[in-house]
Image: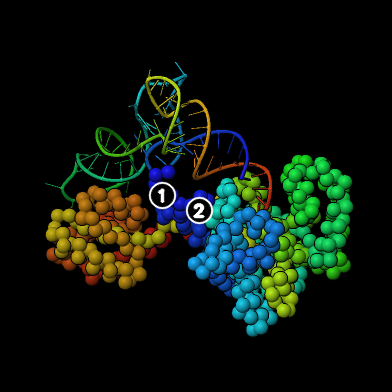
RNA sequence: GUGGCCGUAGCUCAGCUGGUAGAGCAUCGGAUUGUGGCUCCGAUGGUCGCGGGUUCAAUCCCCGUCGGUCACCCCA
């Protein structure tokens, strides 16, 4: 390629393609949900020491093993672009002893994440996530409340076709037991498994369960369910999560094969998948769960229960019918190109500054181009009103005010302009949407 | 990372069995010498993704490469 281009899998968002407003509305809706549920924003660097993700997300996960952007800084330190948000947030909470100051921490974040995967629809190398985290409260009520937050946020975006999938992978004891049971089940079928799953059998047998390779379907028949391996405590926790969700009226389906690809999860795991088909294979809108061991793994002396989720903005935008924003009241000031250029443009700038100081969105056309051209541009930019300033107007301290919707135009004195515009704005608001 | 499909004007695309390119929209100008939208007329705009090969001749066939897309993998 002769011309410079953006890095593979990383996108520009340009004004005018209609997407910027949708991003802003989505983020606003998320912040509003977080406000209602009592979460506050945390911002962390998008770069961390590699070790954080190795210890936090897990050495053997695909994310850490083959998808992380890592590099050395000038001091030879090993850094990584964050592949997800939770490890950084926990690091920040620990580093600043946040839980020494409050019993429960509720954070949300919005920002870019980086994974060097092959790009596809709804999957990019730089992608944006929103997410929430709760630290310090191990109650199953937190699990249900946060899942409710996610579902409620999605409904606010106008999403109706989605499904909450829920599972419990228990704590360390449960997982050790279940791992043994799984290995015992799959070992006799080892040769029938896909090559990937044969490797998983040794490293992370749980992942065989959600393999989509048809070769793994047969051996999977009759495999033990993790739900049967839960300890009494883990089972009680899971049952209470379900009871709380039912009480909240959040529909969900329990799927014992749901396993997440990050090592830090314990007990509750969930994801919300899009069922509209708008996303193809990348149908996971949001994923999360409980990670009661993560603080300890990152060096916390005391264990801290934690729960959270992350959701992909690009994917939400692909399936959310976020409506267009209504047209704002907007004034364009235009120079009649017949008078003296400097005097007229000075007048245009002065008038525009006056309007802007009054809080009115004001566009100027300083090209000193033909009236036709300027009017056309004002129309393209969806100006509600165009104010024309030329030799005549300057001489008489007036402006020509044209209301674009009706084509009506009249001369208005500078003194009366404020009131006249306010009147037009009221009329436009009355005519326009809601 | 593996496989399939696709890369032609700013955008969406057409281009026959190989003979060096077109439309619509957009942009600019004019019809309307200080007035938008609709209509009409005109203009600008392309190393046919890039590199190599076959051929008298390649947008077209072959190979490579870059990018996109779909599936797998994985995941948000």
The quadrant of the rendering that contains the N terminus of chain A is top left
Q: Secondary structure at mark 2?
A: loop
Residue A361: name its quadrant: bottom left
Say which residue appears at 66% left-offset and 83% top-offset: A100
Residue B9: name its quadrant: top left
* Extreme-bottom residue of the structure: A101
Determine the chain carrying the residue at label 2: A
Say which residue appears at 16% left-offset and 62% top-offset: A342
Q: How is the image coloured?
A: rainbow
**Picture coordinates of residue A231, whole percent (x, y):** 86, 66
* Extreme-front residue of the structure: A76
Determine the chain carrying the residue at label 1: A
Residue B69: name its quadrant: top right
- Of the pair A87 and A48, the residue shown nearer to us: A48
**Picture coordinates of residue A67, whole percent (x, y):** 61, 55
Identify the mark nearer the N-term, 2 or 1: 1
Marks 2 and 1: CB-CB under 8 Å? Answer: no
2 and 1 marks on the same chain: yes
Where A310 falls versus A280 (above or below)? Answer: below
| Distance of label 2 from label 1 (alpha carbons) | 13 Å
Q: Which residue is mark 1?
A: A4
- Of the pair A197 and A421, the residue shown nearer to us: A197
Asked if one can make out residue A32 in the rendered structure from this viewpoint, the answer is: no
**Quick check: A11 left or right of A155?**
left
- Of the pair A325 and A81, the residue shown nearer to us: A81
**Picture coordinates of residue A363, whole percent (x, y):** 31, 60
**Quick check: A64 left or right of A7?**
right
Identify the disc placed on residue A10: 2
């Amino acid at each position: 390629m002769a011309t410079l281009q953006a890095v593979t899998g990383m996108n520009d968002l340009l004004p005018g393609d209609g997407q910027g407003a949708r991003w802003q509305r989505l983020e606003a809706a998320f912040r509003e949900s977080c406000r209602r549920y009592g979460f506050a924003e945390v911002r962390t660097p998008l770069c961390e020491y590699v070790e954080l993700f190795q210890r936090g997300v897990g050495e053997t996960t695909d994310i850490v093993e083959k998808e992380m952007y890592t590099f050395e800084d000038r001091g030879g330190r090993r850094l990584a672009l964050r592949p997800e948000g939770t490890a950084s947030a926990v690091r920040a909470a620990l580093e600043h002893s946040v839980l020494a100051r409050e019993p429960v921490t509720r954070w949300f974040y919005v920002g870019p994440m980086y994974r060097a995967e092959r790009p596809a629809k709804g999957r990019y190398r730089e992608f944006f996530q929103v997410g929430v985290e709760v630290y310090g409260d191990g109650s199953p009520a937190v699990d249900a409340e946060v899942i409710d937050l996610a579902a409620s946020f999605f409904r606010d975006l106008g999403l109706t076709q989605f499904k909450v999938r829920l599972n419990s992978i228990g704590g360390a004891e449960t997982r050790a037991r279940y791992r043994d049971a799984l290995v015992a089940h799959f070992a006799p079928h080892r040769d029938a498994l896909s090559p990937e799953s044969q490797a998983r059998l040794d490293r992370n047998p749980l992942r065989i369960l959600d393999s989509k390779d048809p070769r793994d379907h047969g051996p999977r028949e009759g495999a033990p369910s993790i739900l049967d391996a839960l300890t009494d405590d883990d089972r009680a926790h899971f049952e209470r999560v379900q009871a709380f969700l039912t009480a909240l009226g959040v529909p969900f389906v329990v799927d014992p094969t749901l396993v997440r690809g990050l090592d830090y999860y314990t007990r509750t795991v969930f994801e919300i998948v899009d069922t509209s088909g708008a996303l193809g294979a990348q149908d996971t809108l949001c994923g999360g769960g409980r990670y009661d061991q993560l603080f300890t793994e990152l060096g916390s002396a005391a264990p801290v229960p934690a729960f959270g989720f992350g959701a992909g903005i690009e994917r939400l935008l692909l399936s959310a019918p976020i409506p267009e924003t209504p047209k704002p009241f907007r004034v364009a000031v235009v120079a009649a190109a017949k008078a003296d250029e400097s005097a007229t443009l000075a007048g245009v700038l002065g008038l525009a500054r006056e309007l802007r100081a009054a809080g009115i969105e004001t566009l100027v056309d300083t090209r000193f181009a033909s009236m036709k051209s300027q009017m056309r541009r004002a129309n393209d930019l969806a100006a509600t009103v165009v104010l024309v300033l030329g030799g005549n107007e300057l001489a008489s301290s007036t402006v020509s005010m044209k209301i674009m919707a009706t084509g009506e135009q009249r001369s208005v004195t500078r003194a009366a302009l404020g009131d006249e515009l306010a009147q037009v704005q009221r009329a436009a608001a009355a005519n326009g949407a809601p």
